[in-house]
Image (cartoon, rainbow, N blue to C red):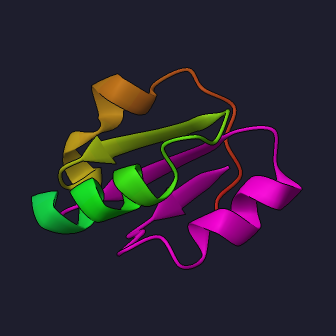
Amino acid sequence: MLEIGSGCGGVTGALLTQAASVECVELSPRRAEIVAWRHKDEAGFTIHVGNLNDMDAVLEGRLIMLL
């Protein structure tokens, strides 16, 4: 599952209970740090820091569900 704009990870935890893996894209490095720390022990969690428009190479070829 792809979460665009994960903020501080409030919804991320709920997504992790419903999906085998969650990839987050967060523009703010500080918020990305918070969500990474908040879910550091979760399996299947990845966070990418940057603008979604610049993530083509990172996310290319992945099967994702957009919310």
- Look at 33% across and 34% down and name the residue there: 56
Answer yes or no: is residue 67 visible.
no
**Is 36 placed left or right of 12 in the picture?**
left
Looking at the picture, how far across and down is residue 58, in whole percent?
Answer: 34, 26
**Is 28 placed left or right of 18 in the picture?**
left
28 in magenta? no
Looking at the picture, how far across and down is residue 41, in whole percent?
Answer: 58, 40
- Look at 19% across and 62% down and name the residue there: 27
- Look at 42% across and 68% down and name the residue there: 6
**Is 59 placed left or right of 23 in the picture?**
left
Q: Nearer the viewer, residue 37 or 58?
A: 37
Quarter-of-image position of residue 13 = bottom right
- Residue reaching furthest to the left: 29
* 9 vs 50: above or below: below
The number of numbered badges drawn on the structure is 0
Looking at the picture, how far across and down is residue 26, in whole percent?
Answer: 29, 60
Q: Nearer the viewer, residue 13 or 60?
A: 13
- Look at 24% across and 55% down and name the residue there: 33
* 42 vs 31: above or below: above
Quarter-of-image position of residue 57 = top left
Q: Nearer the viewer, residue 63 or 11?
A: 11
5 in magenta? yes
Q: Quadrant of the C terminus?
A: bottom right
Report the span colored magenta.
1-27
Answer yes or no: is residue 46 visible.
yes
* 55 vs 59: above or below: below
